[in-house]
């Protein structure tokens, strides 16, 4: 167990090495990107054991988030990412594991961190991943009976119509009005702001902010700036 007073000199890389020493080939060598350390777990069925060790023995007492990635077209299709933090040593660590579309299930870590409850429910709702042993695995954003998983890459940005009896939302959901696209490149973020593509003409909806910016420029010589627009003299 880490001691708070002595742990401040510990790095995420040191802690990652301790995980590897404990679990051997089950854990990949640390991958570092922009100062952040990631480890890959070869067997998703061991995730509870790994996370329990990371919390109790390595001091990762805070589960920041659990996210999922749809590797559409690849197998395994889904990557599940656990973002860990330790208040004692102030280190971050990312654990990754993979699940095939056919299986689509792995154990819950709610017994390790209670905050996993809603994170796992969101992945169940949006990605269709199941977490075995979860105390209350039900949809958290979409309604019960909704037949799709909106964050999968094969779900269209415009949404899909659904026909669920006695449910009010039966048109395209959740992004009705799309698909929403951005202009590749562009001189600034305003020019790249998402807008609706009109399917019939393949044209883009006019970006009102760009028009407004031109009005500002014509009024006082600048396209932005604090304060009200002043008429040029």
Image (cartoon, rainbow, N blue to C red):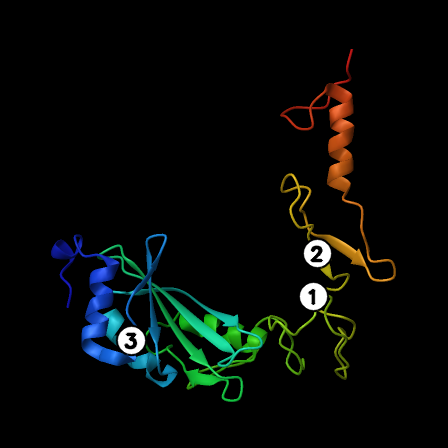
Mark toward the viewer: 1 or 2? 2
Q: Residue tagged by mark 3?
A: 27
Q: Which SS class for mark 3?
A: loop
Which residue is drawn at the image coordinates 27% and 76% (left, top)? 52
Q: Which SS class for mark 1?
A: loop
Question: Sequence order check: which comes first, mark 1 or mark 2?
Answer: 1
- Quarter assignment of residue 73: bottom right
* Residue 41 makes an appearance in the image: yes
Q: Residues within 10 Å of mark 2 (few under 14, many from 20)?
A: some
Quarter of the figure with the C terminus: top right
- C-beta proximity under 8 Å, tags 3 and 1: no
Against 90, is 24 above or below? below
Which residue is drawn at the image coordinates 78% and 57% (left, top)? 197
Q: Residue tagged by mark 1?
A: 157
Distance, label 2 to label 3, CA atoms, is: 39 Å
Against 7, is 80 above or below? below
Residue extending farthest right: 200
Expressed as whole percent of the image width and height from the top left, the position of residue 82 reads 39, 69
Residue 190 numbered tag:
none
Left/right of residue 152 with respect to residue 33 in the rendered view: right
């Amino acid at each position: 167990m880490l001691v708070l007073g002595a742990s401040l000199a510990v790095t995420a890389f040191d802690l990652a090495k301790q995980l590897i020493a404990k679990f051997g080939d089950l854990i990949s060598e640390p991958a570092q990107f922009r100062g952040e350390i990631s480890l890959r777990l070869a067997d998703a069925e061991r995730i509870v054991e790994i996370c329990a060790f990371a919390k109790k023995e390595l001091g990762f007492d805070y589960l920041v988030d659990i996210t999922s990635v749809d590797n559409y077209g690849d197998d395994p299709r889904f990557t599940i990412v656990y973002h860990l933090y330790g208040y004692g040593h102030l280190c971050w660590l990312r654990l990754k594991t993979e699940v095939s579309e056919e299986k689509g299930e792995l154990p819950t870590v709610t017994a390790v961190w209670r905050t996993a409850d809603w994170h796992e429910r969101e992945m169940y709702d949006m990605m269709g991943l199941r977490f075995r042993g979860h105390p209350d695995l039900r949809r958290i954003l979409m309604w019960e009976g909704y037949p799709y998983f909106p964050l999968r890459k094969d779900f269209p940005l415009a949404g899909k119509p659904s026909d669920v009896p006695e449910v009010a939302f039966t048109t395209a959901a959740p992004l009705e009005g799309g698909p929403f696209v951005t202009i590749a490149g562009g001189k600034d973020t305003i020019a790249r702001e998402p807008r609706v593509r009109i399917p019939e003409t393949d044209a883009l909806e006019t970006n009102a902010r760009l028009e407004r910016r031109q009005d500002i420029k014509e009024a006082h010589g600048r396209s932005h700036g604090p304060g009200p627009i002043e008429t040029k003299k």
